[in-house]
Amino acid sequence: MAVFPGIDAYVEAQGFWPDFHAAFITYWRDALADRLPEDYEVRMDERVNLVDLSSDHVKRVEPDLAVTHQESFAGRTSVPSRVATLEPVTIPLVIEEEQRETYIEILHRRDRTLVAVLELLSPANKHEPGRGLYLTRRNVLLHQNIHLVELDFLLGGQRLPLKEPYPLGHFFVLIARSELRPDCQVHHWSVRDSLPSIPIPLKKPDADVLIDLASVYSTAYERGRYARSIDYDAHLTGLAEDEWTWVQGRVRAAPQ
């Protein structure tokens, strides 16, 4: 049973996000498929990032064999010799971690054009070096005739850049309609609130598709059974003191 009326920030804090992300994207895709007009199709796609690990994780290895050569001194009449010597050399490797990110594409079936890209942000999208990679791809989309919908269910990391301050809230949905850019519609709510329903823009003149995020989130959360694995006695960062007090009250009141 869920401890909070909306987003459980402990999923992020205690390392369950990759599993939750994959589940949420799947159920979000299913909800869209049930509501999209016949002229549309919805697909999941995946990108793979190779990100350098921190220096603490860089592994040092010794090669099995290092080959060097020496030439004889000038002036010798004998044929110059080349001598192989076993000289181990220690060199740090750059080990890149593979990070997979799943997202949703909405396509118009008749002309096979990409209409919208839907993202659920991961911690890697909000911390460097992954943030820079994400913003580069994001900027490419924003310069095309494609709608972009981004869900930020995370307390940690840097928010996506906007020209004005974010409204009050812990969680956000950014809807950047191609015909309204650079303006962006921002939905916002706190840890105390349930998730909203949001419009997903389609190709004009087709009307938006309304998606109940609370239903999608609840399905992913309940089927993942995260509440059974989370340590709710742990501290939760990223909240003001009054919000943290409220969280503690919810935890104490939750059925054990």
Image (cartoon, rainbow, N blue to C red):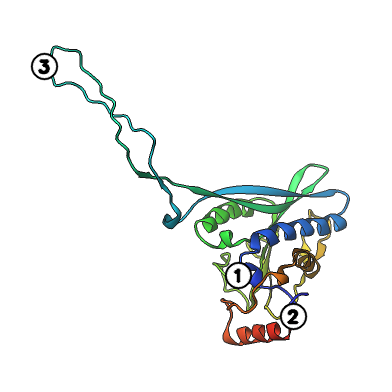
Q: Give the class, few, some or many, for how many residues have Cα within 10 Å of label 1's Cα (few <14, many ≥20).
A: some
Mark 2 lies on residue: 256
- Quarter-wise, where is residue 244 in the image? bottom right
Question: Residue 13: which numbered mark, if any?
Answer: 1
Q: Give the class, few, some or many, for how many residues have Cα within 10 Å of label 3's Cα (few <14, many ≥20).
A: few
Amino acid on which disc 2 is placed: Gln
Q: Position of residue 28 (x, y in %)?
A: 77, 59
Can residue 51 be seen here? The reply is yes
Earlier in the chain: of badge 1 and badge 3, it is 1
Mark 2 or 3, closer to the camera = 2
Q: Give the class, few, some or many, for how many residues have Cα within 10 Å of label 2's Cα (few <14, many ≥20).
A: few
Q: Position of residue 238 (x, y in %)?
A: 57, 76
Amino acid on which disc 1 is placed: Ala
Q: Say above or below: 16 vs 114.
A: below
Judging depth in this view, the residue of 105 and 85 nearest the camera is 85
Mark 3 lies on residue: 75
Quarter of the image with the N terminus in it: bottom right
Judging depth in this view, the residue of 187 and 144 nearest the camera is 187
